[in-house]
Amino acid sequence: MKKSTKSAERDRQRHKFVQALNAMDGTWVRFLRDKDILDINYSDLYTGLWAAEAPLRKQEALLLMRHLSPQTAKKYLDNAIAKGLIVELPDPSDGRAKLIALSQDLKGRLEDFFDNAIEIFRKALT
């Protein structure tokens, strides 16, 4: 049975979307340059911190990794801090608490990744 023109166009768009998604995934891998931190939970953490536009309390940052238990999220966060991707800052409102922010390097790399991903999808949708 022959597909309608509308159905064929929809399939073409879906294929282009999948190709763009795969290209974006490849860009994410190159962006991070570290197989230990390619996990989607790091994506949630990094993009959540970027979107917050201000440092978050450590407990708030842990909640960004919504698919992990608090203990596992803490391990992920500690790993990103140890690698220098995320920095701990003193909380001026509470001397005992820490704020969490993206390192300047990671923030710049994320923004480069976003720009690249936007371009990938823009080309796919034209």
Image (tube, rainbow, N blue to C red):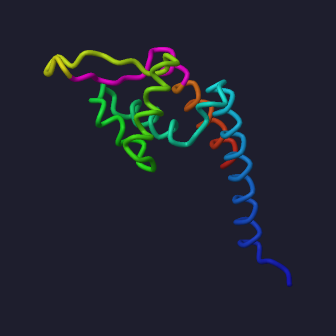
Locate residue 7, reporting x and y percent. 73, 72
Please tell me which residue is depicted at 46% across the width and 35% down the height of the picture.
47
Q: Give left or right: position of 90 versus 78.
A: left
Using the rendered view, name the quadrant where residue 53 is placed: top left
Q: Is residue 2 magenta?
A: no
Q: Is residue 41 left or right of residue 100?
A: right
Looking at this view, is 5 or 71 the one in front? Answer: 71
Q: Position of residue 26 (x, y in %)?
A: 71, 36
Q: Is residue 83 rendered to the left or right of residue 69?
A: right
- Region of the chain picked out in magenta, as a range: 97-109
Residue furthest front as drawn = 71
Count of picture labels: 0
Q: Nearer the viewer, residue 11 or 63?
A: 63
Residue 16 lies, in percent from the top left, at 73, 52
Q: Name the residue at the right extreme.
A: 1
- Which residue lies most toward the left here? 93
Does 100 lie within the magenta span? yes
Which residue appears at 72% of the width and 40% of the height? 23
**Percent x, y for residue 19?**
74, 48
Horizontal arrangement in the rendering, residue 99 relative to residue 16 (left or right) = left
- Please identify the quarter of the rendering in which residue 115 is found: top right
Q: What quarter of the picture does the N terminus occupy?
A: bottom right
The answer to whether residue 3 is above or below residue 111 is below
Task: From the viewer's side, name the closer residue of 1 and 74.
Answer: 74
Q: Residue at x 34, y 24 (%)?
A: 100
